[in-house]
Amino acid sequence: MDSNAKTVPNVARMRVTEVTGRFDGEKMEPAEPSTEDVLRAVTFLRGLPAEDFTRLARTFSERRLSKGEVLVEEGDPGDKFFVVKTGAVNVFKSSSDGRIQILETLRSRGFLGLIPALDGGPYPAGASAREDATILEIQRAQLLDLIRSRPEIGITLLSSLASRQRRLVEQVAALSLRSVKSRVAAFLLDRAYTHGVRREDGVFFELGVTQDELASRLGTVREIVSRALRALKEESVIRQDRDAVTVVDIHRLAATVAGPQSAPTPPDSR
């Protein structure tokens, strides 16, 4: 081939690049959102007038965390409220023997510290960077001043707390009442609906977590998660190639979670 010949761009690869930030093996840094844009997307702040966000953004300071760096420890004084600007943060509980239970993973516009901001108590869980992250933080007193000055955000704030309470109740029920295989199936089913793309051979998505992280999230150990995934593959419910998962039979996957019932057909793409 002529070394001077021009290469025709691969449009499909360019589209993947737009999503992943990678092209020709090189990492492209995505543009960082502004503090105002992130705060506008925080659920309980959406009721604020647009002009308030410029002033509000100035009250937040930024903190950069490296992967694995601790943001707060469980039991620390709850004197700050945090919003994830970029990256991801794991919220976790830990036991005396060192076992970790991941409660949730927060990404851009996810927030932490609302409960101690309201009741004045310590942080009920720890938090650390799952990957390099930029965190916005504000003093508890400043957040309370905002809530007092803008009572209209109170309803959306209560709605946010109620949604989190529901998720925690569901999580407790899953940990206490479901088998590990059922919990793994529930995680895969949720991932299929939120991140899946329908193909001829099933619904494709990336797992998005390591097996160790999945085990921590589901309250078990890596070996049992691996066994559950292997069983789902042997039953031809899923196919898996490292992080790439294809749900071959969405109905059987749903049945593993909730018994013998049909699952609604996922949309063509997400």
Image (cartoon, rainbow, N blue to C red):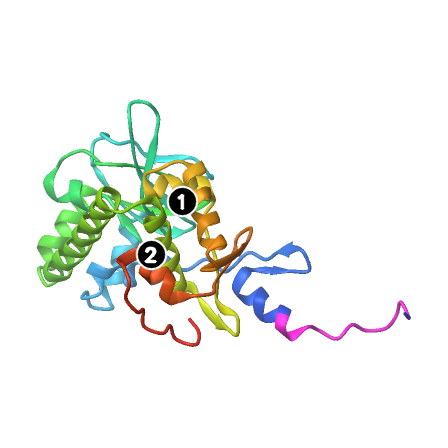
Q: Does any portion of residue 65 appear in the rendered image?
A: no
**Which amino acid, mark 2?**
Thr
- Mark 2 residue crowding within 10 angstroms, few (<14) / some (14–19) / many (20+): many
Q: Closest to the observer: 197 or 185?
A: 185
Residue 115: image x %, image y %? 16, 44
Which tag is nearer the camera, tag 1 or tag 2? 2
- Per the image, is 6 magenta? yes
Residue found at x 22% / y 36% = 123
Residue found at x 53% / y 52% = 243
The stretch of residues the image draws in magenta is 2-12
Quarter in which the C terminus is drawn: bottom left
- Dividing the picture into quadrants, the one containing residue 90 is top left
3D distance between C-alphas at marks 1 and 2:
18 Å
- Mark 1 residue crowding within 10 angstroms, few (<14) / some (14–19) / many (20+): many
Q: Which mark is residue 256?
A: 2
* Residue farthest to the top, as pictured: 97
Residue that label 1 marks: 214
**Which amino acid, mark 1?**
Leu
Q: Closest to the observer: 175 or 33?
A: 175
Q: Secondary structure at mark 2?
A: helix
- Dividing the picture into quadrants, the one containing residue 251 is bottom left
Residue found at x 18% / y 33% = 122
Residue found at x 13% / y 49% = 145
Residue 254: image x %, image y %? 33, 62
Q: Secondary structure at mark 1?
A: helix
Residue 263: image x %, image y %? 31, 69
Principal secondary structure, stretch drawn in magenta: loop
Q: Name the N-terminal-most of marks 1 and 2.
A: 1
Q: Closest to the observer: 249 or 7?
A: 249
Q: Quick check: 145 above or below 266?
A: above
